[in-house]
Image (cartoon, rainbow, N blue to C red):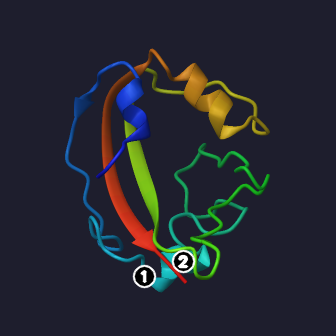
Amino acid sequence: MSWNPYDNLPPAASFSLTSSDLREGEKLAMPQVSGIFGAGDESGSGLPQGAFQLPNDARMARYCGAGPPPGHGRHRYIFAVLALEAERIEIDREATPAWMMFNLFNGTLGRAFLEGWYER
């Protein structure tokens, strides 16, 4: 991975992260491009009981998929998993991902990443 935005955060242990849907450094497959990856829709029906999705930057509580502008070249997508000190995070369901990450700043025990890319 080239520049990693997580490098500027306090150090945390690393662990292995694997996926049957995403291969490190490879082009994203159609499920990741189309937005049906992971929990899928805004209902979060694929999430564990008690879990919920925060609205993303587009204010939709779902993964929207890869969407680089046509002809813009490769865009990379970093999928990060965090191991946390807390068993449960108390956060408003309408909070932004940035607010969540701010609240996890000192509570992260470990991080793992998978990176893919897509271009149109």
Q: Please say if 100 is above or below 16.
A: above
Q: Residue furthest top?
A: 106
- The answer to whether residue 84 is seen in the rendering is no
Q: Please say if 110 is above or below 54.
A: above
Q: Where is residue 66 in the image (x, y as percent from the top left)?
A: 57, 71
Foreground of the two, 53 or 26: 26
Residue 120 figure quarter:
bottom right
Secondary element type, mark 2:
helix
Which dot marks residue 29? 1
Residue at position x 64%, y 33% in the image: 98
Q: What kind of residue is marked 2? A: Val
How far apart are labels 1 and 2 at the CA level?
A: 6 Å
Q: Residues within 10 Å of mark 1 (few under 14, many from 20)?
A: some
- The answer to whether residue 69 is seen in the rendering is yes
Q: How crowded is mark 2: few (under 14 residues within 10 Å), some or many (20 or more)?
A: some
Lateral position of residue 119 relative to residue 71, left or right: left
Residue annotated with mark 2:
33
Secondary element type, mark 1:
loop
Q: Where is residue 54 in the image (x, y as percent from the top left)?
A: 69, 45
Residue at position x 30%, y 21% in the image: 11
Residues under numbered marks 1 and 2 in contact, where contact means CB atoms less than 8 Å apart: yes
Q: What kind of residue is marked 1? A: Ala
Q: Where is residue 73 in the image (x, y as percent from the top left)?
A: 50, 74
Q: Please say if 106 is above or below 75.
A: above
Q: Please say if 44 is above or below 118.
A: above
Q: Position of residue 117 (x, y in %)?
A: 41, 69
